[in-house]
Image (cartoon, rainbow, N blue to C red):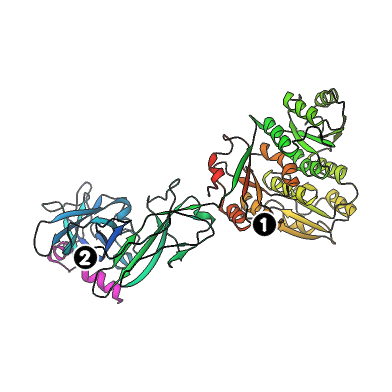
Amino acid sequence: MGAHRRRIIMSVVAGVAVAAAVSVPMLPAAANVLNPPAVVGYIDSIAISYVQDSPSPSLHVAGWAGDLNDGWENGRGAAAIELVATPAAGGATTTIGWAERQDYDIPRADVRRAYPQLGPNQGFDVRWAKAPSVGALNVCARMWNLNAAMPPGGWVLVGCASVTVPATRPSIAKTPSSVVAGTPVTVTSGTTQGTDSFAWWAWNPSAPDPSGYPQPIPGATSASYIPTARYIGNELQAVVTTRVPGRAPVEQYPYMTTVDYPDHTVDRVAGSDRFGSSVAVSQAAFPDAAAGVPVAYLASGVDFPDALSAGPAAAVKHGTLLLTMPGALDPRIAAELTRLHPPLVVVAGGPAVIADAVLDAVRALPFAPEVRRVAGADRFETSRAVALDAFGAAAPSVFVATGRGFADALTAGAAAAAAGAPVLLTDGARSTADAATQDVLAGWGTRTVSVVGGPASVSAGVAASLGPAISVTRLSGGDRFGTAAAVAAAAPASSTAYFASGFGFPDALSVSALAGSAHAPLLLTTGSCIPVVELQTMLDRGVDRFRIIGGETVQTTDINWGRPC
């Protein structure tokens, strides 16, 4: 029998009240009949705690308790642990704390092995029970259980332990008020005259964990800790535990340290809706109205496929991409075209996507541009037609993404635009690449293809059949956000990153030309936070400028500060 199990068994007979309680036979409970309590338990440890710079001591009391005649799970049942303290020299017994709900819901596998009839979470942990006085104290744990026929007084003794509280605080541990993610934060423990050990906890004030308490960071057991991107916006709590032989451990909890993203600038590119945002992106990319642009691409703003290939096409031609309504030319789009006065306007998609009336309205603008429609029978053929029209006879490097969804192709578009490469949409669910895609790649003399998205987006068969002389690299993650991070990590480092919603396509469609001209990645957000996998990539690559696409109803101000999720 192991030492820990011996302690659990022996605790049953550690006191008269406990022994008497355990002797009650376990009988099946009749409906609505409360059983007498059969309490087992033990106080495992008591430490002296000091919070921040307060000289007042608290007690950290940990242990376990259960009622053998009531096999509930603690924290969700009707039981609580009362902690009381009595000065050893004599005096009144004082209630110093309670363990209930999250404080009495600690998993204890050792207890479950010894007492399988109990629920799984029989541990209690009260960190800041106020010490009633200094000097020697006798601390006891009492169980109150509404599911049991409790004795007079309402409680049953679990167990007791003694502790001596020092007359003065031995030291004051300190941590800085803030730290930048990726750089070390150090706790200074002062002169403790003992052996110090360390732990670091994290608490997210915006989205606290279910217990509402800081939670230990696995492996963070040194005086210094380097917070990763996942802890941006969190509060770090250092815990310094000092042990001196013959004395109770002393725990210190200094002021918390806020983890920030490194200093960065933020600007937002947005309009009142998707079409207005399209204009805002165009104006950010081409602020000089006098210079204009050589070409403007128009794509539907109510569906995504045609714009996904049009973005890199516009970028390679040093032009802009604007979104339009299917049946009419928005006055804001007309005004932006007039401002940039391109001699050529390319409309991506057939008449079912963008009506001839839109083309006629563009032709009627004051600068009288040439208007040309580039389209195919479906989204895949239109993608090939747009890419061939823009890139001509050669494209040594190509990005391939599924045309069945927009997320992977959005980030592919910005990366392709930065690399001066086209994006081809494919039916990623096929077992092999279609002949038309293979022919385009062969005709271009393509040597490298970046497949954006995992096998669920673009099958292994499609990737393997793109061409015998083509080197294929897959850029993917566990989801659309992980894929965006993988695409960004594969591109040359940039100090700027663009952010668009990963759950909607409109704002991101027109940004590939802007991101491509800046040679910056497009990352996807949830609208209220940046997934950690992307945030860590930004941190690793030194991104210090955030360009947020879309208004605050699409992307909240939490994106400004790099809130992780």
Visible residue check, residue 220:
no
Tally of numbered tags? 2
Give the quarter of the figure containing the N terminus: bottom left
Image coords of residue 446 (percent x, y): 85, 56
The mark lying in front, picked from 2 and 1, is 2
Q: Classify residue 196 by image quadrant.
A: bottom left
Amino acid type for the residue under numbered disc 1: Ala
| Location of residue 164 with respect to 518 vertically, above or below | below
Magenta residue check for 17 = yes
Magenta segment, which residues?
1-27
| Location of residue 88 with respect to 319 vertically, above or below | below
Residue at disc 2, secondary structure: loop
Image coords of residue 224 (percent x, y): 45, 65
Residue pictured at 57% horizontal, 34% vertical: 553
Amino acid type for the residue under numbered disc 2: Pro
Magenta residue check for 226 = no
Image coords of residue 546 (percent x, y): 62, 45
- Left or right of 341 on screen, residue 62: left
Residue pictured at 78% horizontal, 47% vertical: 423
Q: Name the residue furthest left.
A: 90
Q: Which residue corresponds to mark 2?
A: 166
Q: Which residue corresponds to mark 1?
A: 489
Q: CA distance from mark 2 to mark 1?
A: 54 Å
